[in-house]
């Protein structure tokens, strides 16, 4: 099951409050993929859709699209701030075993 760090939960609630959408949640969905593995998108949403998996942390709800749920099972959403910028990241799990574009995927990882 997807985990949510305390930092990510608090930052997401802060953003939702600033947007006037307290009580809403984050939505995670598949956004494509390739030799580097699946890509996920993130948005805000008022409520879960049919078939969504819902995870809660410190009052934050995260709605996970049924197609994205298997790829996020052993991962964690975190919020990082570095000299290069800040934002939500998905950490953990192993790289997908499939793929195989060889050196053409030098931008992965």
Image (cartoon, helix red, strand yellow):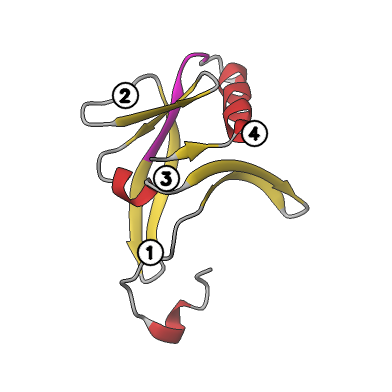
Cβ atoms under marks 2 and 1 closer than 8 Å = no
Residue 61: percent from left, percent from top: 44, 24
41 above or below 25?
A: below
Assign a secondary structure to mark 2.
Answer: loop
Residue 14: percent from left, percent from top: 63, 23
Mark 4 highlights which residue?
Answer: 7
Q: Nearer the viewer, mark 2 or mark 4?
A: 4
Quarter assignment of residue 32: bottom left
- Which span of residues is magenta-colored? 22-28
The numbered mark at residue 48 is 2
Instruction: Categorize mark 4 by other alpha carbons within 10 Å: few (<14), some (14-19), many (20+).
Output: few
Q: Earlier in the sequence, mark 3 or mark 4?
A: 4
Asked whether 49 or 56 is in front, the reply is: 56
Q: Earlier in the sequence, mark 2 or mark 1?
A: 1
The reply to whether the magenta stretch includes residue 56 is no
Cβ atoms under marks 2 and 3 closer than 8 Å = no
- CA–CA distance between discs 2 and 1? 25 Å
Q: Earlier in the sequence, mark 1 or mark 4?
A: 4
Mark 3 highlights which residue?
Answer: 41
- CA–CA distance between discs 1 and 4? 26 Å
Asked whether 5 or 88 is in front, the reply is: 5
Instruction: Categorize mark 3 by other alpha carbons within 10 Å: few (<14), some (14-19), many (20+).
Output: few
- CA–CA distance between discs 2 and 4? 22 Å
Mark 1 highlights which residue?
Answer: 37
Q: Nearer the viewer, mark 2 or mark 3?
A: 2
């Amino acid at each position: 099951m997807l985990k949510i760090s305390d930092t990510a939960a608090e930052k997401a609630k802060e953003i939702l409050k600033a947007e006037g959408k307290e009580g809403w949640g984050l939505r995670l969905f598949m956004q494509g993929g390739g030799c580097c593995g699946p890509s996920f998108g993130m948005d805000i949403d008022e409520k879960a859709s049919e078939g969504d998996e819902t995870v809660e942390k410190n009052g934050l709800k995260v709605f996970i699209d049924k197609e994205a749920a298997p790829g996020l099972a052993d991962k964690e959403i975190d919020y990082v701030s570095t000299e290069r910028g800040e934002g939500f990241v998905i950490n953990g799990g192993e790289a997908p075993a499939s793929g195989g574009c060889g050196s053409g995927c030098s931008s992965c990882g």
